Amino acid sequence: MRAMKKLAAVAAVALSMTFAATAHAESKSWAAVKGSIHGKANMVFGGNLAAARSTKVFSSAMQMMLTEEPDAARAFEMLKTGCNIDVPAAITDFTVVMRDAEDPLVVLALNGLDEAKLVACVESLTAKELGKAVKLTAKKKGKITTYSVPGEKEKLYFAWLAKDVLAFSEDPTAKGKLEKLLAGKAAKGALGKYLGKVNSDHALWAGVSMKEKEDGLTILGGYGSVDLAAGKWNGTAHIVMGSDKDANTAAAMGNQGLGEIRTKAKGTSVSAMINSLVLAAVGAELEVKGTLGDADLTQLVTDFDKIF
């Protein structure tokens, strides 16, 4: 019974975390980085902020982030007042490449911003802080640009993969890490196959290649996306199992578990999403489809805590 509940919960969470259908469009950030996926990466995800920016969940998430990260809030305000750069509006889409949810390579596609404009902004803001003119030097070697200020030992490392596409690691002072993260080629094997099936222009998308054993079933990974239309988030998750038999077993277990969850979810914002879920085995994949209204998404986390 625990396994049934867990499978149903995983399916539901998968939709809110992303996974879905075959498509052809590409986001700018993915187009810029897809040929530089480091060999040990097993997880790639991204999103189209232009599609999500007008939603309640985006504004709520942004407000929560700014409340919890006062330094980020201050930086956003400085960029807006000092350089007329609205950070949330400036990022059109993003891609993140990771290995086992660690060492992320973050790639941002920017709207109306390039290296020259950002360097000028940093120089202006730094000069205001220090009370004197500051000249930021930039030296590019390969894909990496080293930024430094005369007289300062610490340097920062970023990569402009296109005129308006910026890439960096979690530690911008570590040149070697960024070089390593950008040293790969196009994803191959299972990850490459999964990423070839997603639509990177959707509001959220992902491809994961990670073999696991759960309750006797083999899970090889998954792929998909979540799109936004008419105020509703629509997603399809493809969880790749080890065999057709495993997929059929997982579907049966998941559907039984969903029955129990639907009872617990009555009267909550999660109810509509849980009721919309459809689990089915398609060959060796467990396919999960569902829909959630944008107005309900902000309450989702609270109600999930009550149910699970």
Image (cartoon, rainbow, N blue to C red):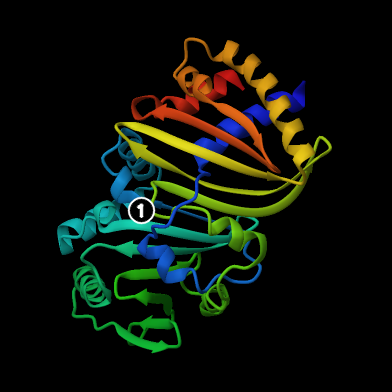
* Amino acid type at image mark 1: Asp
The quadrant of the rendering that contains the C terminus is top right
Q: Which residue is drawn at 59% across and 63% down?
A: 192
Marks counted in the figure total 1
Q: Quadrant of residue 187?
A: bottom right
Q: In which quarter of the image is residue 124?
A: bottom left
Vertical placement of 246 versus 126: above or below?
Answer: above
Residue placed under numbered mark 1 in the picture: 71
Residue sitting at the far right:
216
Q: Is residue 153 left or right of residue 164?
A: right
Please name whichever residue, 191 or 295, is drawn nearer the observer in this view of the structure: 191
Q: Is residue 34 left or right of residue 71?
A: right
Q: Which residue is drawn at 53% across and 22% down?
A: 274
Residue sitting at the far front:
283
Q: Which residue is drawn at 84% across and 37% down?
A: 216
Vertical placement of 79 versus 120: above or below?
Answer: above
Please name whichever residue, 136 or 48, is drawn nearer the observer in this view of the structure: 48
Please name whichever residue, 194 or 207, is drawn nearer the observer in this view of the structure: 194
Could you say where residue 265 lies in the image, as x and y percent from the top left?
Answer: 54, 15
Q: Is residue 304 left or right of residue 272?
A: right
Secondary structure under tag 1 reads helix
Q: Which residue is drawn at 35% across and 56% down?
A: 93
Q: How crowded is mark 1: few (under 14 residues within 10 Å), some or many (20 or more)?
A: few
Q: In this view, does 5 lie to the left or right of 15?
A: right
Could you say where residue 94 lies in the image, as x and y percent from the top left?
Answer: 40, 58
Could you say where residue 77 lies in the image, as x and y percent from the top left?
Answer: 23, 53
The quadrant of the rendering that contains the N terminus is top right
Could you say where residue 234 lies in the image, as x and y percent from the top left?
Answer: 43, 35
